Amino acid sequence: MDRLLNVTTVLSAILLIIVLISVRRAHIRVEYSVTWLLAAAAMLVLSRMHALLEAVRKLIGLPDSPLALFLLAGGVVLIMFFRFSVIISHLRDDNIALAQRVAILEYHLQHRKNDENQEA
């Protein structure tokens, strides 16, 4: 059990470092990195604080502490995926609206050019 928790600790620390480097290099926006940072920090804390993990395990009613840790991690990942799906859906809708506005502007510009050519 300790070996699995040690691996989880290392993976959580690596995730924290990767997210911080990605924010620094502007590969990920700060508002999206907060979720990843909180998830990695929670995994790190739970994998190091055996008493807290044991309390969570008893609260959930699972037989093994690492199982409780990975169940919580899986739940957090599902929530994050849902959140990002909502964000992507809004971005898609915004892209469609923007493309429509550009098409309308191009139509008006073309119409104006045709009117100017007819007057000349």
Image (cartoon, grey):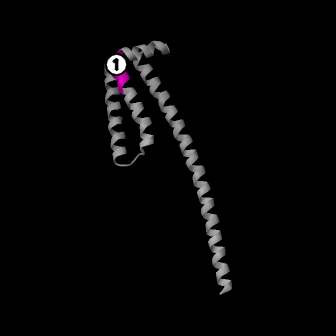
Task: Report the number of numbered marks.
Answer: 1
Q: Specify the quadrant of the image occupied by residue 32.
A: top left
Q: Amino acid at mark 1?
A: Met
Note whether 7 is above or below 28 in the view shown.
Answer: above
**Residue plotted at (35% across, 31% down):** 12
Side (left or right) of 2 relative to 90? left
Q: Specify the quadrant of the image occupied by residue 82.
A: top right
The percent coordinates of residue 28 (x first, y second) are 41, 45
- Magenta residue span: 44-50
Locate the N terminus by quadrant. Answer: top left
The percent coordinates of residue 76 (x first, y second) are 48, 29
Q: Which residue is mark 1?
A: 49
Along the viewing direction, whichever of 13 and 20 lies nearer the viewer = 20
Main SS of the magenta segment?
Answer: helix
**Residue plotted at (58% across, 50% down):** 92
Locate the C terminus by quadrant. Answer: bottom right
Along the viewing direction, whichever of 75 and 36 lies nearer the viewer = 36
The percent coordinates of residue 10 (x first, y second) are 31, 29
SS of the residue at dot 1?
A: loop
Q: Specify the quadrant of the image occupied by residue 97.
A: bottom right
Whether residue 29 appears in magenta in the rendering, the answer is no
**Residue plotted at (35% across, 22% down):** 47
Note whether 114 is above or below 108 in the view shown.
Answer: below
Instruction: Count residues near mark 1 (Cα–Cα under 10 Å), then give few for <14, some for 14-19, many for 20+.
Output: few
Side (left or right) of 70 relative to 17? right
The percent coordinates of residue 107 (x first, y second) are 65, 69
Farthest bottom residue in view: 120
Whether residue 48 appears in magenta in the rendering, the answer is yes
